[in-house]
Image (cartoon, rainbow, N blue to C red):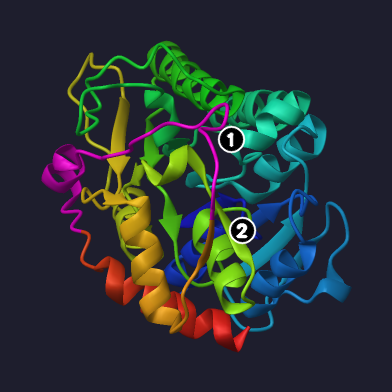
Amino acid sequence: MKILVTGTAGFIGFHLIRKLMELPDIEAVGLDNINDYYDVKLKYGRLAETGISENDIKYNVAVPSQIYERYRFIKLNLEDRENLNRLFANEKFDIVCNLAAQAGVRYSIENPYAYIDSNIVGFMNILECCRSFSIKHLVYASSSSVYGMNAKIPFSEDDRVDHPVSLYAATKKANELMAYTYSHLYQLPTTGLRFFTVYGPWGRPDMAPMLFANAIINEKPIKVFNHGDMSRDFTYIDDIIEGVSKVILKAVEFNEGETPYQIFNIGNSKPVSLMEFINTLEDAIGKKAIIEMYPMQPGDVKVTYADVTKLKEKYGYCPEKSLKRGLSNFIDWEKLN
């Protein structure tokens, strides 16, 4: 089985490649444009952990891993339709897992065009390539942000998601609609995964776990929005990767005449208040946080809470890592890096 994973210099994509390379009979190609939304040193560090040297990377050139014999990496923009099309033609992938996207809720308010280019145009090119080259299954990253200001908790895939409160959320909802259209018109099997606040080693530096950890370790103040009255469904990276790999590897089954389209929440299903999260982080680090309270920020939501019943029933997804254990693992890595 040959799999294309986009976003492999990113947090989830990096961990997914390492998981896939532990499994037999899987060949993978990783793709990323290595943009500078956050420090590229972290991205090159992730790539190095999968055997891809920064010095070997050239645009649109596949680089073989020095660690995994069944893995290659290519630096490429999803907006580069011609070269993306050529990649699909040459490689003849069986499955595509699209994790590449311009991330960040607040950044989407400052730089909206980056989200349209990557998350809309780039995803359109992925869909067209999947259709043109008869991909057996497209798995793609959506987000809990599509639920917007949804007051009903836990969030269910059956809830309406018509009121996104950030452009990032709007692009993720658009991806789901675009995927449905291609599933309906061309019988392309697609699965969207709505991720809920993923954290762990090699995580994104723009997200609360790393922002807070770095500040506490260095005895600098942390910004706590909505005066701490927020909750998040923090999900450890290993649980996320276990779920994503189950979705990728299980054969897609749909009834005849049914649109081969599905959406799943993928989270811990145990929301934690922001202040409890900070307290647990303090315990893991062994230092107290210096807290500065701020009002709610544009694009933020008060609560995220995943109902993962459907993913459990269909794929046997079962998150296991407690927040205490997950943050302990994360801080162990953070102190070493």
In the image, residue 33 lies in the stretch drawn in magenta: no
Q: Does the magenta stretch include residue 308?
A: yes
Q: In this view, does 284 lie to the left or right of 325?
A: right
Residue at 83% over, 52% down: 60
Q: Could you tell me which residue is drawn at 43 percent across and 13 percent down?
A: 163
Q: Which amino acid does label 2 sit on?
A: Thr
- Secondary element type, mark 1: helix
| x, y percent for residue 185 | 44, 11
Does label 1 or label 2 sit earlier along the sequence?
A: 2
Instruction: Report x, y in % for residue 258.
Output: 23, 17
Q: Name the residue under label 1.
A: 105
The residue that label 2 is drawn on is 8
User: Percent from the top left, x then y, of residue 177?
Assistant: 45, 16
Q: How far apart are marks 1 and 2 (CA)?
A: 20 Å
Instruction: Report the front residue among 271 and 174.
Output: 271
Q: Residue at x 61, y 71 (%)?
A: 214
Q: Residue at x 61, y 29 (%)?
A: 123
Q: Label 2 crowding class (10 Å Cα cut-off): few <14, some 14-19, many 20+?
A: many
Range of residues picked out in magenta: 292-318
